[in-house]
Amino acid sequence: MSKHPPRIDLRRAAEALAPMEGVDTLAAFPRLLEATESQGADRAMHWQAHLSCVRQRPTSPAVLWLHLQVAVCLPLPCQRCLTPVDTLIEIDRHFRFVHDEATAEREDPDCEEDILVLSVPFDLSELVEDEVLLALPLSPRHEDCTLRTMPDMPNTKAAPGDDEEPHDNPHEEPPNPFGVLARWKQ
């Protein structure tokens, strides 16, 4: 079932006590699609959001919480060979809502949970996309990556000297890291 994360009234959704969940494709999330270089638009993203109102004391106001879970496998470009590498992103986060930005700024440094400002309607889709973008690895790579050959280049290892023993002899010159470039010119 495909159900894009909605724009919701957080208080009403919390009172309903029903978790929201769905499966959508990456095509519904333009910034994520851009991060994957427009590959995998048909890949499924599973998400679940559960809202709750919690009172610390019977006389205190209810505090709104959101538990967000997301799972998606993104085809990110490998930073060594530039071909897609499937990268599993899993998110399991709790958010507490406050009424204004000043309260969020004041409480955020002291809290373990993430604090969001209560807005009506709340864009759950944007939060899902933001959290996945924040969870992306800085440098996605294949576990055993060798540079893929281009039609006019010889096949080489990802980093020159990766397959050699460490250089222990202090009297020998270390291998030239640009030596592979000289071989490409031939």
Image (cartoon, grey):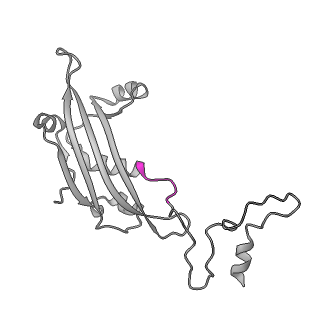
Asked where in the image residue 163 lies, by quadrant, the reply is: bottom right
Left or right of 129 in this view: 157: right
Foreground residue among 137 and 118:
137
Foreground residue among 105 and 20:
20
| Residue appearing at x 29%, y 32% in the figure | 96
The residues colored magenta run 135-140
**Does the magenta-highlighted stretch encompass residue 136?**
yes
| Residue appearing at x 16%, y 34% in the figure | 11
Left or right of 167 in this view: 41: left
Residue 42, given in percent of the width and then of the height, sits at 28, 67
Residue sticking out furthest to the right: 171
Residue 36, given in percent of the width and then of the height, sits at 40, 64
**Does the magenta-highlighted stretch encompass residue 11?**
no
| Residue appearing at x 74%, y 72% in the figure | 179
Residue 38, given in percent of the width and then of the height, sits at 37, 68
| Residue appearing at x 33%, y 51% in the figure | 129
- Per the picture, the main secondary structure of the magenta-coloured stretch is loop
The mark total stands at 0
Foreground residue among 34 and 158:
158
Residue sticking out furthest to the top: 59
Asked where in the image residue 62 lies, by quadrant, the reply is: top left
Quadrant of the image for the N terminus? bottom left
Foreground residue among 168 and 119:
168
Quadrant of the image for the C terminus? bottom right
Residue sticking out furthest to the left: 16
Left or right of 1 in this view: 89: right
